[in-house]
């Protein structure tokens, strides 16, 4: 952050008012952008919800198939059972 001394008097007051207006405008733009991004995120989450459900169902089916085929999980990885 840099401060610049512009003195006193009418010119300084004009510069200060201009700076204040610029900051308020920038803050309003940031709030508007944040609101727009929040709406967009909500829309994307709604689009992704069915895909998430399908992914969970696929994971259950894969797990059932691997267990039925004699596989097991070891440290997060699926492995074939050793033959005896």
Image (cartoon, helix red, strand yellow):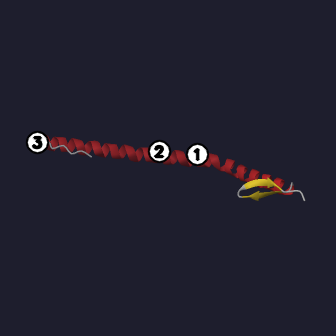
Residue 75 spot, x, y in % from top left: 71, 58
Residue found 70% across the figure and 52% down from its top: 53
Q: Determine the CA span between mark 3 and mark 1.
A: 51 Å
Q: How many marks?
A: 3
Q: Where is the C terminus found, in terms of image quarters?
A: bottom right
Residue 23 image label: none
Q: Nearer the viewer, residue 42 or 76?
A: 76
- Mark 1 closeness class: few <14, some 14–19, many ≥20 residues within 10 Å: few
Q: Is residue 22 above or below residue 57?
A: above
List the residue tagged with mark 3: 10
Q: Determine the CA span between mark 2 and mark 3.
A: 39 Å
Residue found 11% across the figure and 43% down from its top: 7
- Mark 2 closeness class: few <14, some 14–19, many ≥20 residues within 10 Å: few
Residue 29 spot, x, y in % from top left: 37, 43
> Tag 3's secondary structure?
helix
Mark 2 vs 3, N-terminal side: 3
> Tag 2's secondary structure?
helix
Left or right: 73 in relation to 25: right
Mark 1 vs 2, N-terminal side: 2
Q: Is residue 8 above or below residue 61?
A: above
């Amino acid at each position: 952050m840099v401060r610049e001394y512009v003195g006193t008097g009418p010119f300084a007051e004009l510069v200060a008012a201009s700076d204040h207006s610029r900051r308020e405008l920038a803050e309003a733009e940031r709030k508007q952008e944040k609101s727009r991004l929040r709406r967009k995120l909500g829309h994307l989450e709604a689009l992704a919800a069915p895909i998430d459900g399908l992914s969970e169902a696929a994971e259950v089916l894969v797990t059932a198939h691997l267990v039925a085929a004699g596989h097991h999980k070891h440290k997060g990885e699926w492995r074939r059972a050793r033959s005896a």
